[in-house]
């Protein structure tokens, strides 16, 4: 399997798009395209798996529960979110797509939902 992560980006102006690229042995690699989206007010992601997130292009604000200010993520910025680390996307760039690469895994190794 091969490809280019920057080509054939879908139009995400109507909604964030998630595209699994590879899933093997309890690990999933996913491409996410955002364009001005945010997690709805009052909602939080509370995932049962660890996730490593990299912004390849664009920018976003990610708020982790308990922190007072969102973390601003720009091209090349990454962070690891442990399982059940409640977080929300406060904003993504409104004028261009934000392209994310995520690696998700569950301990002990098992299938992801």
Image: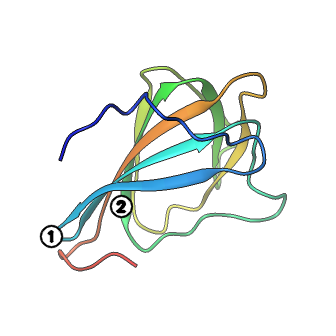
Relative side of 22 to 109, left or right: right
Name the residue beneath numbered marker 2: 50
**Mark 2 or mark 1: which comes first in sequence?**
1
Q: Is residue 97 above or below residue 113?
A: above
Tell me which residue sits at (57%, 41%) in the image: 33
Name the residue beneath numbered marker 1: 25
Q: Is residue 20 above or below residue 33?
A: below
Q: Position of residue 4 (x, y in %)?
A: 32, 31
Tell me which residue sits at (77%, 22%) in the image: 95
Tell me which residue sits at (37%, 68%) in the image: 49
Mark 2 vs mark 1, CA separation in Å: 14 Å
Q: Is residue 97 above or below residue 21?
A: above
Foreground residue among 50 and 37:
37
Label annotation for residue 93: none
Q: Secondary structure at mark 2?
A: strand
Check disc 2: other Cα within 10 Å, few if <14, some if 14-19, many if 20+. Answer: some
Q: Nearer the viewer, mark 2 or mark 1?
A: 1
Q: Quadrant of residue 10?
A: top right
Q: Position of residue 69 (x, y in %)?
A: 71, 36
From the image, which quarter does the C terminus lie in? bottom left
Q: Position of residue 48 (x, y in %)?
A: 43, 74
Q: Position of residue 27 (x, y in %)?
A: 24, 63
Foreground residue among 42 and 4:
4
Tell me which residue sits at (56%, 69%) in the image: 46
Total residue callouts: 2
């Amino acid at each position: 399997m091969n490809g280019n992560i920057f080509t054939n980006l879908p139009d995400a102006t109507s909604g964030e798009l998630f595209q699994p690229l590879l899933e093997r042995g309890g690990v999933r690699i996913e491409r996410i395209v955002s364009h001005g989206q945010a997690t709805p007010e009052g909602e939080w992601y509370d995932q049962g798996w660890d996730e490593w997130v990299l912004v390849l292009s664009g920018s976003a604000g990610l708020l982790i529960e308990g922190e007072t200010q969102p973390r601003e993520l720009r091209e090349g910025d990454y962070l690891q979110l442990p399982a059940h680390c409640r977080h929300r996307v406060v904003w993504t760039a409104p004028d261009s797509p934000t392209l994310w690469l995520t690696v998700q895994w569950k301990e002990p190794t098992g299938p992801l939902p």
